[in-house]
Amino acid sequence: MSTYRNVKFLTSAASARQLIEDQGREVAFAGRSNAGKSTAINAITQRSGLARVSRTPGRTQLINFFELVPGRRFVDLPGYGFAKVPAAVRENWLELMQLYFDTRESLVGLVLIVDSRRGLGEQDVVMLEWALAKGRGAHVLLSKSDKLNRRDSTRVLRETEEACADAAVTVQLFSAHARDGIEEARSVMDAWLAEE
């Protein structure tokens, strides 16, 4: 498919009743608040201002829907982790995401953004479990890999692959800054969105 050129914002949802109609196919993006999720989305879509990049982690507080082509979407989920927000707001994010994963029939895969310098965290594992619980695929982007030397990047890739032993989880190194891994990430999304 690889039709990211015409991607457009559809809507934002703060609650389950605001989610768009559950039809077609969609891929979700998730990650810790400081993992580089917005930057990765912008690099993959080649749209610098599509997902808002902020100096303050945790700015994505809604579920944002974007259309690639009719019936094919990607979804930017709220960040988690180090966001400087009240506990009640953070808890609402997690409840909304769990509901999204539990009920969304059009969701076919999860792209999980993980800072390659930090590795998988506890909440990252929870996100993978939510995605896999319904038989969906999951793909881990080890972001900011340009900040590691070759030995360390090879090590973190191997360790993450071992931690994600489930056959439905794939892992890759990714750097939006160096433009490494963009085509690989797109090909994973294309395969998920093309399947019937």
Image: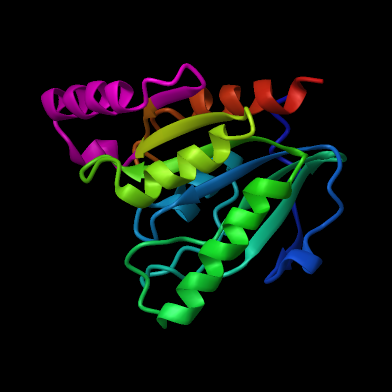
> Relative to 15, is 196 above or below?
above
Q: Residue 138: image x %, image y %? A: 52, 31
State the residue at coordinates (77%, 39%): 106
* Viewer-proximal residue among 17 and 85: 17
Asked if residue 196 can be seen in this view, the reply is yes
Q: Name the residue rendered at 63%, 47% in the picture.
A: 101
Tell me the quadrant of the picture where the C terminus can be found: top right
Quarter where residue 192 is shown:
top right
Q: Which residues are magenta?
A: 143-171
From the top left corner, tell me how far across and down residue 167 is, in percent: 47, 16
Q: Is residue 189 left or right of residue 11?
A: left
Name the one closer to the observer, 64 or 161.
161
Up-down: is 182 above or below 83?
above
User: Residue placed at 54% from the left, 42% from the top?
Assistant: 130
Left or right of residue 106, residue 172 in this image: left
Q: Position of residue 129 (x, y in %)?
A: 48, 38
17 lies above or below 21: below
Tell me the residue at 71%/66% (across/down).
12
82 sits left or right of 94 in the view: left
